[in-house]
Image (spheres, rainbow, N blue to C red):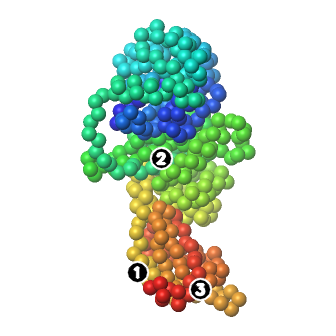
Amino acid sequence: MNVVSLVGRPNTGKSALFNRIARKRVAIVFDQPGVTRDRVTREVEFAGRRVMLVDTGGIAFDRQVTRDPLDDETRSQAALAVEDSAVCAIVVDAREGITPLDEEVIVRVRESGVPCMIAANKCDTADDDYRAAEFERFGLPVFAVSAEHGRGVQELLGAIAAKLPAAEAEEESARPLRVAIVGRPNAGKSSYINRLLNAPRVIVSEIPGTTRDAVEVPFQIGTGPEARKYMLVDTAGMKPHTKMSKTSVDNFSLFRSEEAIKEADVVILVLDPVLGPTMQDKRIAGKILDANRACVVMMNKWDLAQEEGITETKATEALRTMMPFLAFAPVVFCSNKSGYNIRRTVAAIDTAAGNACLKLPTGMLNRVLTVAAKKTLSPMIKGKRLKIYYGLQVSTNPQTIRLFVNDPKLVTPAYLSYIEKNIRARFGLEGAPLRIFLKARSRKDLASEG
């Protein structure tokens, strides 16, 4: 797929234009230089062409512009985006006019040899369009646009489409598996993606809060029809609400991370076994459970944990004690630094995704329910017991089962947990959440429906 990148100096409105084209608030927009650091991507379609649209961090050759210690890494990510691009749109601020930094960015992009044009942003009305003419002296096509209001964006996209290489026949392929990587700051989420890709795709730093956007990274194993395709989503470290300002970039980052969990097929929860499961880890796990997402727990930095004398048994016991509600999730002990067990994480992702979509045969499910009910009777409540007449799988991803019973009020949490354990014992479902709903039915109703 052709790549189209939006580049430019800080605070010209690249992320706002990116969101306008993507028709969704994907990239964080905030009135502060240096908010975007990594390459944020989204597959979009315009003028009959499908492209991978890329938002990049503001290119600053002087750290005083953004006062961001990660300027060098941001600039490197932008350079890689240009290198991968079929077309680049250089976004400038028409209101401010040409700045020395604009000139330097334009020179660097032109030297790359990638076809490019200038998007003169913030031309909110026709009266502002004259400001764009100043940029014509660079000899590039200039388009007066307004990311905020959408003015001129379609003309810009038409020009971009005209510069794209001739379209090749696109093969229909299965949607890639969306895998969100979440956890506290500095747990190792970004370095995990870089280890999988064996490339510096996302910025890694010891500075907490390095990742801000939810960064989508395509990943593939194998080639041809048998290839397994994934969309890895690197997320910002999720801090407690008490440590964030209501207007801070962190607040936007947290929202993006929560959205990434809801949109994922599988969520990897990255933990630091040396610190052990914390209250914040428990909160994050709760968000995964609330979203009913398949889950894999990744104990990263296992090499450091072993140096501290921590064993897999001790770490697992601590995890299950702190997060008993996440007992269905497999645990993989690994190290991004050494590469230990990294391949096992991919196998665990595949297993969790497969189990979340597993079809449960109705006859087999009901045999499990019958045996479980005979083995352990439900507790007596006001002289009555729960009777399970029939069970039916009503949906997958998440796994959802409806039980037809005499009276849903007669069930206890402990007995419902017992039923779930029996279903899991028979079908596995490792990594997949399981929802069980009860519905009142009499034997006479079921007989007439049958």
Q: CA distance from mark 2 to mark 3?
A: 51 Å
Question: In this picture, is 269 found above or below 366?
Answer: above
Q: Quick one: SS at disc 2?
A: loop
**Is residue 25 at all visible to an observer of this figure?**
yes
- Residue found 38% across the figure and 50% down from its top: 175
Judging by the rendered image, the residue that carries numbered circle 3 is 406
Question: In this picture, is 384 found above or below 324?
Answer: below
Give the mark toward the camera: 3 or 1. 3
Closer to the N terminus: mark 2 or mark 3? Answer: 2
Which mark is on residue 335? 2
**Is residue 78 at all visible to an observer of this figure?**
no
Q: CA distance from mark 3 to mark 1?
A: 20 Å
Q: Name which quarter of the figure residue 416 lies in.
A: bottom right
Q: Name which quarter of the figure residue 123 lies in.
A: top right
Question: In this picture, is 21 found above or below 62?
Answer: below
Q: CA distance from mark 2 to mark 1?
A: 43 Å
Closer to the N terminus: mark 3 or mark 1? Answer: 1
Tell me whether circle 3 and circle 1 mark residues in contact (CB < 8 Å). Answer: no
Estimate the x, y position of residue 392 in percent, counting from the top left: 47, 76
Q: How many marks?
A: 3
Pick the front one: 410 or 296: 410
Q: Quadrant of the N terminus?
A: top left
Judging by the rendered image, the residue that carries numbered circle 1 is 363
Badge 1 density bin: few <14, some 14–19, many ≥20, Cα 10 Å: few
In the picture as drawn, the residue positioned furthest to the front comes out as 126
- Residue found 36% across the figure and 36% down from its top: 48
Q: Which amino acid does the dot numbered 2 rest on?
A: Ser
Estimate the x, y position of residue 109 in percent, counting from the top left: 42, 18
Estimate the x, y position of residue 341 in percent, counting from the top left: 42, 51
**Is 122 situated left or right of 396 in this image?**
right
Q: Which amino acid does the dot numbered 1 rest on?
A: Gly
